[in-house]
Image: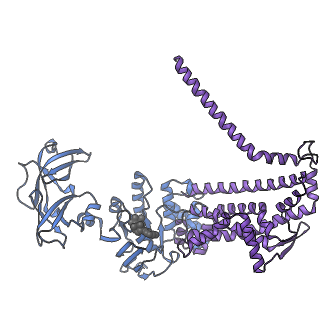
């Protein structure tokens, strides 16, 4: 059934408007069978609306939703081969755990014996055996979450839609459930479309991430690619920690060169294609790519960028030490250095330092993007 | 402890008890104001004398007299019949109206539908009664009766009375059911549809069971209001039809007797029972709410 060449879910130029609000703006996506696909973006970026259009709870204003190559058109939710884990779980309060989980099979007329057997299997899978007779309000948040998952998975959908399924759990439980969800997904092999506003969650769980903002998909790719090669300022800012240095573009093309407000020339590995020489821009560098040197030990030449600065703050974080470095021109950088390289490498507040990083780790963006 | 501190403490204590005492006294007065007449009425329904002001011993003879009074018994069963039938109809229609207004928020003239639905609650009974009367006259429905036998009694209940009761009860049922629907989580319906339930099955398996406390509460309220109604029944029944309140009104014009006290106590007991049930249904509401979140 799962022909690898046919996407499990495809969105073709989908637009959704609510009156004058454009919730989803010309989104096209292809999600492969068995993929763990994350829709990542801040609140209000259109993630839920996108998910609801796949589930059939909203119909696109324009464009098309296909599931396993089949256009869904006006199909209502109960005719689509997908199931949903809702943000607040939406467990039926008047039914027991077993009745909740059995609901989908019952609606499809599966024989009673088979339902009983499969409910048992599901309870096993989510480690809730013995909870059959409980009511949802007698369960903890994590347990409710697992019932919601079992209730959806028992139907063996082609695609499982999850809307911030861990959002209501506390941090520790959320971490544990991330691993558990990922393990379950690998075990059942069902395509997951997973909505979250937590970039860390998306990075650790997903095979691919689509970053959304203002209803648009800005970038799609595997987590390392999205993290290391953000293509817009928004993506660079939203995912992980980033240093931004205001610059002016000197040269674009095969090599990119920019000038900081403090007068330093920087080489960059990549610049947004629409940038031209003379344009105001922002150079972005991840803090963990940077190193600090004392002025006399800094490397000369080579594929490195260097700027001078003064240590403003030193914050000890256990695994690493974070420095805030003040640069000329009212700009500061955050640098993360691993702990344990000897006392000589610990810098003091007020010390004069050179910040060094590989030029290929520098990406230049338009200021307005 | 210094003398002045002791004095301040004493003052505080005095003020505390004064406040408490006043509060309790006020509560008692309030209750007395509302319920003393009722208590007196109930007590004097057991008074072994025609006098309604002097106690002369306990008796059940007024209740016996009531049971033997053919007209009272007919009125009683008329009341029950009208209440049952109008409650059933009003509960179905009121629930549907509540669903339409609460669930399908976007339809033309929704505000108009809202207002017309609440109108019967707001306008005075007498105005509604006269409008209904005019309606039955003009529409030709008139005062035709529905003939039934219950408990060995032949009843002739005007359709107009039943329609009148339905007309005001729809509003009350709709208000109660809407309150319930408003606090229900709509994603539950979506979850059911996500799990392959058609809208029809979603309604029976999820929506209705969850809104049931509201429906029951609305029905009990409608039943109570129907039993208690005087004005609308009086105006829409034509000649010779009595419900219990209308009958009591007829009797009272010939003077208050302990038999009226007995009938009134009976009605009171009925209403009390229904209100208790309605409150219990509402309590069910609360429990469900906790379950839902
Ligand atoms: N039913 C609706 N009616 C009107 N506006 C809506 C509706 N649903 C979502 N929106 C709007 O669409 C935008 C995207 O919402 P949503 O998809 O819920 O974002 P997210 O899930 O990323 O937080 C928001 O501006 C939101 O206010
Ligand atoms: Mg959302």
Q: Is residue B52 left or right of residue A307?
A: right
On screen, residue A70 above or below A102: below
Q: Is residue B132 left or right of residue A329?
A: right
Between B186 and A138, the residue placed more toward the observer is B186
Q: Is residue A206 left or right of residue A86?
A: left
Q: Is residue B67 left or right of residue B292?
A: right
Q: How is the image coloured?
A: by chain
On screen, residue A321 above or below A134: above
Q: Residue A143 in the image: x percent, y percent?
A: 50, 56
Chain B as rendered: colour: purple
- The C terminus of chain A lies in which quarter of the figure? bottom left
Instruction: Quadrant for residue A276, please give it.
Output: bottom left
Can the viewer see residue B261?
Answer: yes
Q: Residue B24 in the image: x percent, y percent?
A: 68, 37
Which residue is painted at 16% across and 50% down in the image? A326
Can the viewer see residue A189?
Answer: no
Between B88 and B35, the residue placed more toward the observer is B35
The quadrant of the picture showing ligand 1 is bottom left
Between B116 and A131, the residue placed more toward the observer is B116
Q: Residue A127 in the image: x percent, y percent?
A: 50, 58
Q: Residue A82 in the image: x percent, y percent?
A: 47, 73
Which residue is painted at 85% across and 45% down in the image? B43
- Chain letter matching colour blue: A
Instruction: Quadrant for residue B169, please give it.
Output: bottom right
Which residue is painted at 45% across and 77% down in the image? A59
- The N terminus of chain A lies in which quarter of the figure? bottom left
Instruction: Quadrant for residue B202, please give it.
Output: bottom right
Total marks placed = 0
């Amino acid at each position: 059934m799962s022909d690898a060449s046919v996407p499990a879910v495809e969105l073709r130029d989908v637009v959704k408007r609510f009156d004058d609000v454009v919730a989803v703006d010309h989104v096209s996506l292809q999600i492969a069978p068995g993929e763990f696909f994350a829709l990542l973006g801040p609140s209000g970026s259109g993630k839920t609306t996108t998910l609801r259009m796949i589930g059939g709870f909203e119909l696109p204003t324009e464009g098309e939703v296909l599931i396993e190559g089949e256009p869904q058109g006006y199909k209502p939710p109960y005719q689509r081969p997908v199931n949903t884990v809702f943000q607040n779980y939406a467990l039926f309060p008047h039914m027991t755990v077993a009745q909740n989980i059995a609901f989908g099979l019952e609606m499809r007329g599966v024989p009673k014996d088979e339902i009983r057997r499969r409910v048992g299997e599901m309870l096993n899978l989510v480690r809730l055996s013995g909870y059959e007779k409980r009511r949802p309000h007698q369960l903890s948040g994590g347990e409710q979450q697992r019932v919601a998952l079992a209730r959806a998975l028992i139907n063996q959908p082609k695609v499982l839609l999850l809307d911030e399924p861990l959002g209501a759990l506390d941090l520790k439980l959320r971490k544990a459930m991330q691993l558990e969800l990922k393990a379950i997904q690998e075990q059942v092999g069902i395509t997951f479309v997973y909505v979250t506003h937590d970039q860390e969650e998306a990075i650790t769980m997903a095979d691919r991430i689509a970053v959304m903002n203002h209803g648009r998909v800005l970038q799609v790719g595997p987590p390392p690619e999205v993290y290391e090669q953000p293509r817009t300022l928004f993506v660079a800012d939203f995912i992980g920690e980033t240093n931004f240095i205001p610059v002016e573009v000197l040269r674009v093309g095969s090599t990119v060169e920019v000038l900081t407000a403090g007068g330093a020339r920087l080489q960059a590995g990549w610049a947004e294609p629409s940038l031209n020489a003379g344009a105001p821009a922002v150079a972005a560098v991840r803090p963990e790519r940077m190193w600090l040197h004392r002025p006399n030990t800094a490397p000369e030449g080579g594929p490195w960028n260097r700027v001078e600065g003064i240590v403003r703050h030193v914050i000890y974080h256990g695994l690493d030490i974070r420095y805030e470095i003040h640069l000329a021109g009212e700009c500061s950088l955050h640098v993360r250095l691993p702990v344990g390289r000897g006392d000589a490498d610990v810098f003091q507040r007020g010390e004069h330092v050179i910040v060094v990083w590989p030029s290929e780790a520098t990406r230049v963006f338009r200021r307005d993007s | 402890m210094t003398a002045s501190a002791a004095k301040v403490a004493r003052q505080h204590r005095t003020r505390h008890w004064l406040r408490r005492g006043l509060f309790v006294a006020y509560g008692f007065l309030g209750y007395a104001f509302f319920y003393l007449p009722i208590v007196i009425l109930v007590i004097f329904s057991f008074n072994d004398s025609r006098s309604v002001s002097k106690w002369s011993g306990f008796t059940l003879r007024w209740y016996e007299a009531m049971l033997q009074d053919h007209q009272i018994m007919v009125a009683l069963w008329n009341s029950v019949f009208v209440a049952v039938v109008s409650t059933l109809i009003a509960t179905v229609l009121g629930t549907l109206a509540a669903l339409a207004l609460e669930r399908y928020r976007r339809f033309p003239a929704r505000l108009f539908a809202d207002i017309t639905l609440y109108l019967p609650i707001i306008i005075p009974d007498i105005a509604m009664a006269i409008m209904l009367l005019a309606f039955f006259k003009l529409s030709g429905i008139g005062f035709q009766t529905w003939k039934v036998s219950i408990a060995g009694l032949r009843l002739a209940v005007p359709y107009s009375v039943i329609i009148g009761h339905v007309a005001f009860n729809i509003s009350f049922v709709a208000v109660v059911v809407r309150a319930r629907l408003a606090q229900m989580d709509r994603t539950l319906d979506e979850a059911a549809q996500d799990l392959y339930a058609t809208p029809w099955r979603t309604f029976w398996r999820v929506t209705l069971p969850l809104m049931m406390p509201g429906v029951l509460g609305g029905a009990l309220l409608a039943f109570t209001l129907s039993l208690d109604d005087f004005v609308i029944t009086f105006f829409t029944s034509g000649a010779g039809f009595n419900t219990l309140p209308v009958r009591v009104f007829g009797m009272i014009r010939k003077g208050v007797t302990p038999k009226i006290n007995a009938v009134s106590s009976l009605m009171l007991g009925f209403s009390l029972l229904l209100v208790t049930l309605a409150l219990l249904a509402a309590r069910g509401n609360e429990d469900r709410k906790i379950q839902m979140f």
